[in-house]
Image (cartoon, rainbow, N blue to C red):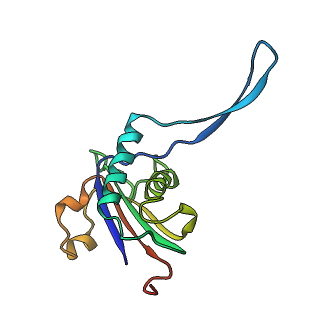
Amino acid sequence: MILRARIYGIARPQGSKRAFRWQARDGRSGVSLVESSGENLKSWRSAVRDAARDARPPQLIEGPVQLTLVFYLKAPKSRKGMPLAPTKRPDLSKLARAIEDELTGVWFHDDSQIVQALLEKRWDLPTPQDVDLNNTATHYQPGVFIECGPYPPGVL
């Protein structure tokens, strides 16, 4: 069983957690954890969650999981000096974390089940190889392609 979903939109990274020490005037002190996120992240995660639910399997994947995430990022307007693939922010691992969190409990029990992951950032432009494969133009809109299944492939 291989699950697939394509979500269109601007992919948002999961924010970093930061710890802050605090001390009250009465002498109490502690540490607070704050995760940076915004309204854009909430709407992106909601879109991912909705797409994952639409492709929900009859039962969650048990055991080890393989995951492929291909993020299509908006290409710069000027192609002059543009790198072959996006090398600036957002960070690939933070983009993946937001997706993994939304697939937890929908496609698999916990993201700790992921034992193999292929993560990729591409521009939202077709490459010569893609044109040879007759992919449609909608494939190159910003967003993410997700593929997930049991690991090793083809065993279950």
Camera-side residue of 26 and 79: 26
Q: Is residue 15 above or below residue 91?
A: above
Q: x and y percent of residue 137 in the render?
A: 17, 61
Camera-side residue of 127 and 45: 45
Tally of numbered discs: 0
Q: x and y percent of residue 119 in the render?
A: 46, 64
Report the residue that reaches farthest toward the right: 27
Q: Identify the residue at horizontal 26%, vertical 58% (top origin).
A: 125
Q: Identify the residue at horizontal 36%, vertical 53% (top origin).
A: 48
Q: Identify the residue at horizontal 26%, vertical 44% (top origin).
A: 77
Report the residue that reaches farthest toward the bottom: 155
Q: Is residue 76 left or right of residue 91?
A: left
Report the residue that reaches farthest toward the top: 25
Q: Is residue 33 left or right of residue 98?
A: right
Please identify the quadrant where the N terminus is shown.
bottom left
Q: x and y percent of residue 83 in the render?
A: 39, 55
Q: Identify the residue at horizontal 34%, vertical 64% (top origin).
A: 56
Q: Is residue 19 left or right of residue 88?
A: right
Q: x and y percent of residue 145 in the render?
A: 33, 62
Determine which quarter of the picture holds residue 42.
Answer: top left
Please identify the quadrant where the C terminus is shown.
bottom left
Camera-side residue of 96 and 130: 96
Q: Is residue 136 above or below residue 11?
A: below
Q: Is residue 37 above or below residue 53?
A: above
Q: Is residue 130 left or right of residue 64?
A: left
